[in-house]
Image (cartoon, rainbow, N blue to C red):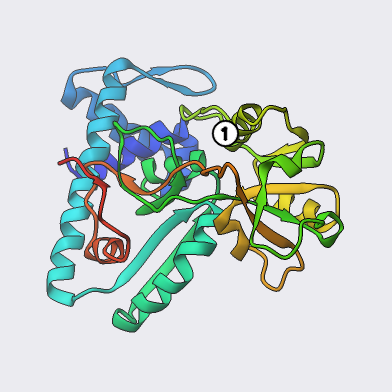
Amino acid sequence: MDIRHLKYFITIVEEGKISQAAKRLNISQPPLSLHLKQLEIELGVTLFERHTRKLIVTEEGILFYKRAKELIELLTGTIEEVKELSEGTKGTLSIGTISSLGAELLPERIREFQIYYPDVQFQVWEGDTNRIMELLENRIIDLGIVRLPIDNSIFDMIHLPEESIFVAMSSKWNSYGDGPTISLSVLEEKPLMLLRRQQGTSMYNQDMYTVDSVKTAFINSGFEPRIICESSDIMTLLTWAHHDIGIALVPKSAINLIPNTQLIFKEISSPSIIASPSALIWLRGRYLSSISRKFMESFPMENPMIKS
């Protein structure tokens, strides 16, 4: 058995069909089928149940798939580590982020990082927290910037600073003066638009966060909010606010999403509302390149949740 056999097996599992796996590997189907048969003979187990339309992975096959992925990851990480020792810090850093936090946290850090490491290239993926966690698990990205909660058994994290909830509104709704804050009570009966977590199809289905925290704050203040829209897309809320549809309640980091906007942002006070906590996360047990580790140093480490 060699690394090639492991890569072939992993591809077959992920594609579900020999034909699709052969296409992805750019080899013909008969040799790939032969490699699979030889692997099963060598292991002395059946890795797939053969059906007309696709292959079904057996329990033994699932276990072997997990271990094969770990072995490939270990080998890849070792090769990267050796290269970095001989060549210095260069390569590609892949980061996943939710849009509002990315706009707030990344530009300045990347600009500074490029001064010291000009040979580093960046790949940035945007999505909701569910999507970022899936990209990390599939090893498509190295680091993720997300809203909590996440699965603490799979990811390590560095907590990021807290953010207050702000209102974003057009001049139509701004009858509250020029001050930087707005009392929660004056939003009674106003048409509000709230951010919620997208309900994904992965294992990371979580309850709505901003919606619940805002509703709770209103109820504690003695009245229920008039909510006209709930959206998982923060840009939708800001766009609707720009078009006078209502007042959007968004984390502070959303202020930087639309440059030169005419929207008016005010921090909610009396009481203030804290957005769902955020964190820089990475897959537990995965080898992190020196590029990733150096980039992580630009984030505060006062309260890291890192388990060895």
- The kind of secondary structure element at disc 1 is helix
Q: Nearer the viewer, residue 161 or 69?
A: 161
Q: Which residue is mark 1?
A: 213
Figure quadrant of the C terminus: top left
Q: Residue at x 42, y 68 (%)?
A: 122
Crowd band around label 1 with a 10 angstrom C-alpha radius: few (<14), some (14–19), many (20+): some
Viewed as shown, does residue 118 lie left or right of 40? right
Q: Is residue 1 visible?
A: yes
Q: How many marks?
A: 1
Residue 71 x %, y %:
19, 41
Q: In which quarter of the view is residue 225 placed?
A: top right
- Three-letter code for the amino acid on which mark 1 is drawn: Ser
Viewed as shown, does residue 215 lie left or right of 53? right
Q: In which quarter of the view is residue 61 placed?
A: top left
Q: Residue at x 36, y 67 (%)?
A: 92
Q: Is residue 141 visible?
A: no
Q: Nearer the viewer, residue 178 or 266?
A: 178
Q: Residue at x 80, y 51 (%)?
A: 240
Residue 100 x %, y %:
56, 56
Q: Nearer the viewer, residue 87 or 56?
A: 87
Q: Nearer the viewer, residue 56 or 18?
A: 56
Up/down of 148 relative to 263, above or below: above
Up/down of 228 relative to 220, above or below: below
Residue 248 x %, y %:
72, 48
Residue 246 x %, y %:
81, 47
Viewed as shown, does residue 271 lie left or right of 7? right
Viewed as shown, does residue 5 lie left or right of 186? left
Figure quadrant of the N terminus: top left
